[in-house]
Amino acid sequence: MNFFWFPIEHLPIIILIMLIAFSVHEFAHAWTAWKFGDDTAYREGRVTLNPIAHLDWIGMLFLVIAGFGWAKPVPVRRSRFKNPRQMNIMVTAAGPISNLLLAFLLLFVFYLLGALNVFDKASPDFFNNILTFLNYWLSINLALFLFNLLPVPPLDGYRIAEEFLPLKTRMVIQENSQWITFGFLIVVFVPPLREATIGQLMQLRSPIVQGMQWLLGLVF
């Protein structure tokens, strides 16, 4: 019996990619906030790519077992920004965008190596391993990009949407945030509900990759 969400033989690859994806995501939040004038995350040692500074190990375990996890949230004090609304949106968006850029970056490297005929002498097994890593890299980073844009607390998408909501609406959501989060977790962990909602969202990964491939096709 396999107790993991992913094939057990691929766990080393999955864990490595998750460590990179989570670390870059949280670093992007922390670095952007620091550059905009809030040094809260900087003083807590979060402006770093060191995975230990960012990972919630329970969240990591859940991701490996259930396909859903989390990292330590980056503390942000929007009141320290010169333009709190605009800068908070950019700080929040920096995380998901970093995962989108990670996906594109490795695909670019893969196309570049292919254009340089680096893979011509590679063995079939080596090339298949490269493809496996690339596929997981794209899948996980694009999943983090899309998932975090959902306007549900405590995800990044809600923190962006919150900037456009009336004060009264924000207060109502804050008062009921624990119930909203609990309901969201039920959706995430109940397979039929997950497939009908988040599963549909994750299907957007394919057209995003196709768009990247089209763009890289113009270059190479």
Image (tube, rainbow, N blue to C red):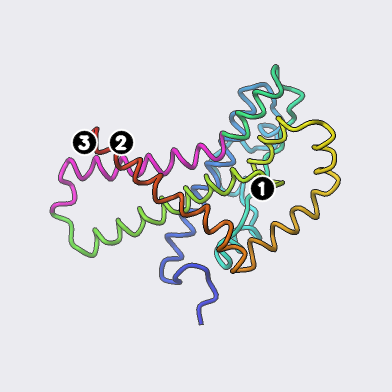
Q: Residues within 10 Å of mark 2 (few under 14, many from 20)?
A: few
Residue 102 screen position, x and y as percent: 43, 41
Residue 199 position in % (x across, y down): 53, 59
Name the amino acid type tagged 3: Phe
Q: Nearer the viewer, mark 1 or mark 2?
A: 2
Q: Which residue is mark 2?
A: 215
Quadrant of the drawing holding the C terminus: top left
Provide the secondary structure element on which disc 2 rests.
helix
> Is residue 190 positioned above or below 158 on the image?
below
Residue that protrudes farthest toward the top in the picture: 82
**N-terminal-most mark, 3 or 1:** 1
Q: Which residues are magenta?
A: 94-120
Rendered image: mark on residue 220: 3
In the displayed structure image, the side of residue 126 where residue 60 appears, left or right: right
Q: Amino acid at mark 1?
A: Lys
Q: Quadrant of residue 213?
A: top left
Q: Nearer the viewer, residue 200 or 136?
A: 200
Of labels 3 and 2, earlier in sequence is 2
- Residue type, label 2: Leu
**Which of the two residues, 189 or 25, is positioned nearer the viewer here?**
189
Q: Residues within 10 Å of mark 3 (few under 14, many from 20)?
A: few
Give the Cα separation between the discs numbered 3 and 1. Answer: 39 Å
Which circle, 3 or 2, is nearer the viewer?
2
Residue with the mark numbered 1:
72
| In front of the other: 45 or 188 | 188
Q: For residue 188: magenta?
A: no
